[in-house]
Image: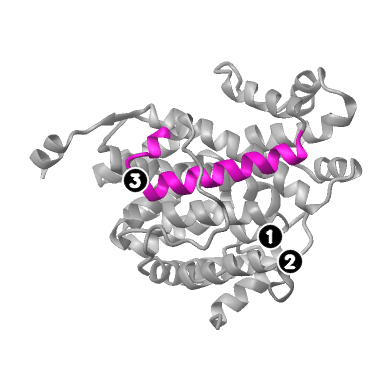
Amino acid sequence: MASIFALAVRRLVLRQVRHLGPVRPGRAPDRVAAVCRQMEAEFGMPAPPVALHAAAPEVLDAVWLVLRETLLAGDPADRAAKEAVAAAVSLANSCPYCVEVHGATLIGTRRDDDARRIAEGRLDEVRDPALRALAGWARDGAPIRLRADRAAIVTGVAVTFHYLNRVVNVFLPETPLADVPVGGRDAARRVAASVFGRLARAVVPPGRAVTGLPPRPLPDDLGWAAPVATIADALARAAAAIDEAGAAVLPAAVRDLVLARLADPAETGPGLAVDPWIAVRVAPLSPADRPAARLALLVAFASYRVTDRDIASLRAAGHGDDALVRVAAWAAMAAARRAACLLSGRVRPVTDIEAIQSE
């Protein structure tokens, strides 16, 4: 039976998700219900950034699988470092919702000033050198030295949040405290830190996610995950599912355009001039494909710039909630995979002998 806390968060999900109709737990397909039950049991609540995918069950499955195996599974003593990566990536992507949640969890797990400094974006003031280096790598791509298995774990967390930040910016409000009066938010943050810190101490065994996604080979661009088998397996399954979801709703010309822009090192995104930037890039496409291309490009490069108009344009082209989720998921994962490639390239390997000598 779900806890009172989990039931309260269910209501929060139904209230906070934007642009999508609610999928009520009692009416959800079996596949969605199974994921939500495990999420409540192991995460303590139906996390809104995951639950918002319910209109596309295979995407929900993929997102939960990756979040579980990268952030939740494994030694709870490692959770603070993972939360530091989650918060730092969220700072880089201008995702205040995720900064709020994972900054609070970091504070609840470490309970020190360094956690607060990261949550507030003051990474240069972090005193713990290892934590400062990890957060600097996650936010800014600063070089770091890590063992291959350690690099796989933290890069897995990074790719997860490069993905989640983008869909959260589209489908959730700026803060999970949107319904809390401004004067009560500091108290709410203290409560959240305590609750999230307690939940983060739960033991989640790796490799036991509820999933209907079949095993898939690990793509070359995710090869950095290979040293940790459960993370590699989760990413391979999820990447394939989201690729297929995108192919079902996005024409090849749109996907090729987004991938080409992501691969271009000279591409800096729209800056302040969104409409001219979009217009130039979608000009070669047919008019019918441009609304989906616009949303996909914005999700990949500037998800916080997606507007009601962008969603309405896609709906006017005949797309429902399931297609909206799949378009956003495909673009977010494409961008996240590219970001993870860049981050993994900033890791200098540490050998087993070096690791032993440093202890």
Say whether residue 90 is visible.
no
Q: Determine the secondary structure under disc 3.
A: loop
* Chain-order first, disc 3 or disc 1: 1
- Which residue is pictured at 34% across the width and 51% down the height? 81
Q: Amino acid at mark 1?
A: Ala
Q: Secondary structure at mark 1?
A: helix
Label placed on residue 54: 1
Q: Position of residue 138 (x, y in %)?
A: 41, 39
Image coordinates of residue 44 in percent, x first then y, are 49, 71
| Labels 3 and 2: the sequence-earlier one | 2
Q: Residue at x 28, y 60 (%)?
A: 77
Disc 1 and disc 2 in contact, CB within 8 angstroms: yes
Q: Quadrant of residue 17?
A: bottom right
Mark number, residue 80: none
Visible in this render: residue 131?
yes
Q: What type is the residue that disc 2 sits on? A: Val
Q: Residues within 10 Å of mark 3 (few under 14, many from 20)?
A: some
Q: Is residue 290 above or below residue 147?
A: above
Looking at this view, is 98 or 290 the one in front? 290
* Residue type beneath disc 3: Val
Instruction: Estimate how packed mark 1 is, as few (under 14), some (14 to 19) or many (20 or more) residues with alpha carbons within 10 Å.
Output: many
Which quadrant: the N terminus?
bottom right
Magenta stretch, overall SS: helix
**Mark on residue 228?**
3
Frontmost residue, 113 versus 296: 296
Q: Which mark is residue 23?
A: 2
> Does residue 62 lie above or below 166 as drawn?
below
Is 135 on the left-hand or right-hand side of 334? left
Q: How far across and how far down the image is residue 303, in percent? A: 66, 40
